Image: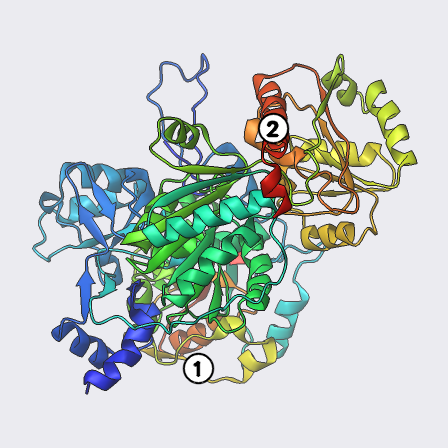
């Protein structure tokens, strides 16, 4: 067995406790496993951002003070924080298209989901990619995350504008128009799924449309809170 | 529309290459047209073999270095279980336990399921997969200009260099292989000039490949000065340059993955360096990048055992350059035994012999380069020696620190093996702490010793190996340095005519 990330060979340690058990295959070597930066659970109550001794972070206060966006997103749950290590992984997973890397997060994704949103009824809506990007990449990373979660998936949205988010500043993002369009209204709680929560703009664009079409409550589940 | 005139514009970009769709700057219509006219061939990225798969770009056949993308993922995930082979099923189960649920659901479904296989080995160069084929140029090739007397270098080669240069030129003329076994600091690049000069006069396409990016960036300006009339392009990860049939390509060996029967002359510098010898993908790429009839020149100071063996049984002709360009012998490492070196370091203390030597060394004007086996040791030794700096592969200010050391702003530099080769500091002494550690193999120790005494102004330098356990690598390294010195002396004594030339 080789480590999924660094390709080093994993030599499982045999001890008296696991000698007679059926061996569970490890996907990552212990060095890489340790570097996965799980988000601390005492972060911002709204967006999971790691902050000290505050209920709600400045970022969320800013969103809540605007009448257009107030109360749109009930809560964001993230699994990891954005470290250089995570950045490298995202670069290979998303931009190079190394799809199989999703399985190195699966354990944590499910753990965090069951701790936070497992009682939640509703459907998962992965944030869509544009046709063009999907063809190029061969998969949608948000969909890949959603498939790990135990709720039904609905493709309620499509993206009509291309994604160039990563290169824009906060103010530029706020000014651009909504890149999504509704294809299927959902009249239950919705959990939006995406890979990154940076400013929260993308998630809120999607939330705005879904709520306008009858969704009762919007949560979001993102892999990384940066 | 593509006709005979415009075809050359395409050929200039594609000739001798093996590219992905996104690397071709043409529209879909153009590509279809080129394929229809058999100028461009579309070949599958991944092919199935009896034991699994094979990547047609990097030659990877290891099953753990292939990934799968379930196609069904784009719409509704349905996997008809009965359509999968048993190995596919086990791969799916291993990496995607969550599919089990869906596998069960989809057993009854009739919707076709597809998944794609992609290569994870060469994914940093763009993904090759069963839905992303490779494109190979089969059309006419571009004739390169023949340029006489391209070389503007006016220096003089030493007799040893001249002898090697002649052999290199003959190898290029006869399109054969040649190993150039030249000591560290022999002036390898200059020895190539006569051969390259000849190659350009015939309109040959030449590639100078090396495993290391810093060598590429260092050679590029140098060769530009030497061959001002030749089109040269440097290629490495993240290079802004594009190769449009340049006459001389200076590339990292990874970049050769994008070539196919392109070069008449292939020079591989530092052929024994990491990762070339450790990664079968790179020799595969280098072998494919050159034309079937072409010359290969391998330059190294420390050939790997396999190459030495090939040379000994006359499978690979070789030429020695046993002396440095300034003619002085290589510094021979001194061995200093240190009892309980490890336990001493564990106690955060520098061993006594090291301290004594350091005090003595600091009286001299030379800078000091201290090699340590691991990054942890680099941190430790750095903290124990005042006014020292440290550098290792992942250190953030790696480039700046090396540059400062080069400019002599730092007196003592603690480093891991990353500085073992390719760098030249004019006047340094070298110490290796725990030379018996297994990261220091023979090649590494010879290269490390080769850092000292490289300039003609100060051709001497001390090399000291501090060790707890003496290893055969250390002994072999010292022996091979002594052998080279002897060979140099011997040849000097018996070939007085050559010296006078």
Calculate the distance from the C-alpha at mark 2 to the C-alpha at mark 1.
80 Å
**Quarter where residue B432 is shown:** top right
Residue A121 on image: x %, y %: 37, 56
Residue B20 left/right relative to B230: left
The residue labelled by disc 2 is: B490
Q: Is residue B90 above or below residue B55?
A: above
Residue B202 on image: x %, y %: 36, 66
Q: Is residue B263 above or below residue B58?
A: below
Residue B465 on image: x %, y %: 71, 24
| Kind of element beneath mark 2 | helix
**Quarter where residue B27 is shown:** bottom left
**Parent chain of label 2:** B
Same-subunit check for callouts 2 and 1: no
Q: Is residue B39 above or below residue B435?
A: below
Residue B299 left/right relative to B284: right
- Of the pair B347 and B98, the residue shown nearer to us: B347
| Kind of element beneath mark 1 | loop
The residue labelled by disc 1 is: A178
Q: Image point 44% across, 15% down: which residue?
A: A17
Q: Image point 27% across, 41% down: which residue?
A: B61
């Amino acid at each position: 067995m080789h480590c999924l990330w660094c390709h080093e060979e994993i030599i499982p340690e045999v001890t008296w406790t696991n000698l007679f058990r059926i061996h569970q295959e490890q996907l990552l070597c212990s060095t890489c496993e340790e570097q996965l930066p799980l988000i601390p659970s005492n972060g911002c109550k709204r967006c999971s951002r790691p902050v000290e001794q505050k209920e709600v972070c400045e970022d969320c206060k800013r969103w809540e003070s605007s009448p257009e966006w107030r109360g749109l997103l009930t809560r964001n749950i993230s699994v990891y924080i954005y470290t250089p290590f995570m950045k490298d992984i995202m670069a290979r997973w998303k931009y190079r298209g190394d799809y199989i890397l999703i399985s190195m997060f699966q354990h944590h994704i499910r753990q965090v989901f069951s701790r936070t949103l497992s009682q939640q009824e509703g459907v998962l809506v992965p944030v869509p990619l544009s046709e063009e990007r999907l063809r190029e990449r061969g998969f949608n990373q948000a969909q890949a995350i959603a498939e790990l979660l135990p709720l039904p998936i609905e493709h309620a949205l499509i993206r009509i504008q291309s994604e160039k988010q990563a290169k824009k500043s906060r103010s530029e993002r706020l000014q651009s128009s909504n890149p999504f369009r509704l294809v299927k209204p959902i009249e239950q709680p919705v959990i939006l799924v995406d890979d990154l929560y940076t400013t929260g703009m993308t998630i809120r664009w999607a939330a705005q449309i879904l709520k306008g079409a009858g969704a009762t409550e919007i949560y979001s589940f993102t892999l990384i809170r940066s | 529309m593509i006709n005979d005139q415009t075809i050359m514009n395409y050929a200039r970009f594609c000739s001798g290459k093996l590219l992905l769709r996104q690397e071709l700057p043409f529209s879909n219509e153009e590509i279809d047209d080129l394929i229809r006219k058999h100028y461009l061939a579309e070949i599958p990225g991944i092919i199935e073999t009896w034991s699994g798969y094979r990547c047609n770009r990097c030659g990877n056949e290891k099953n753990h270095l292939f990934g799968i993308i379930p196609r069904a993922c784009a719409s509704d995930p349905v996997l008809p279980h009965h359509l999968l082979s048993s190995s596919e099923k086990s791969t799916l189960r291993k990496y995607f336990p969550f599919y089990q649920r869906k596998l069960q659901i989809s057993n009854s479904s009739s919707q076709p399921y597809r998944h794609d296989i992609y290569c994870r080995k060469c994914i940093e160069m763009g993904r090759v997969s069963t839905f992303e084929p490779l494109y190979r140029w089969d059309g006419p090739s571009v004739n390169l200009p023949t340029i006489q007397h391209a070389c503007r270098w006016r220096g003089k080669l030493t007799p040893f260099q001249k002898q090697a240069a002649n052999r290199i030129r003959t190898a290029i003329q006869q399109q054969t292989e040649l190993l150039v076994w030249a000591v560290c600091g022999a002036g390898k690049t200059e020895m190539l000039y006569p051969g390259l000069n000849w190659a350009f006069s015939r309109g040959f396409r030449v590639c100078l490949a090396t495993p290391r990016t810093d060598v590429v960036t260092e050679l590029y300006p140098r060769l530009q000065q030497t061959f001002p009339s030749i089109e040269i392009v440097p290629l490495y990860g993240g290079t802004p340059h594009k190769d449009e049939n340049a006459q001389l390509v200076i590339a990292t060996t990874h970049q050769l993955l994008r070539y196919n029967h392109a070069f008449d002359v292939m020079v591989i510098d530092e052929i024994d360096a990491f990762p070339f010898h450790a990664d079968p993908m790179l020799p595969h790429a280098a072998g494919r990048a050159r034309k079937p009839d072409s010359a290969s020149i391998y330059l190294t100071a420390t050939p790997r055992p396999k190459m030495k063996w090939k040379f000994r049984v006359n499978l690979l002709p070789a030429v020695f350059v046993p002396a440095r360009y300034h003619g002085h012998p290589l510094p021979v490492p001194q061995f200093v035994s240190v009892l309980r070196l490890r336990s001493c370091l564990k106690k955060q203390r520098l061993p006594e012999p090291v301290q004594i030597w350091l005090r003595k060394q600091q009286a001299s004007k030379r800078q000091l380069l201290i090699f340590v086996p691991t990054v942890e040791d680099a941190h430790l030794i750095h903290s124990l020696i005042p006014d020292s700096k440290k550098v290792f592969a992942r250190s953030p200010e790696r480039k700046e620190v090396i540059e400062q050391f080069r400019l002599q702003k730092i007196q003592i530099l603690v480093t891991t093996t990353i500085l073992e080769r390719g760098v030249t500091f004019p006047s340094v002494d070298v110490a290796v702490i725990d030379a018996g550690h297994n990261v220091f193999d023979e090649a590494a120790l010879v290269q490390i010793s080769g850092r000292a005494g490289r300039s003609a102004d100060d051709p001497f330098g001390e090399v000291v190996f501090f060790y707890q356990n003496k290893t055969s690598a250390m002994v072999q390294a010292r022996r091979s340095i002594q052998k080279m010195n002897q060979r140099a002396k011997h040849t000097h004594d018996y070939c007085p005519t050559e010296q006078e030339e």
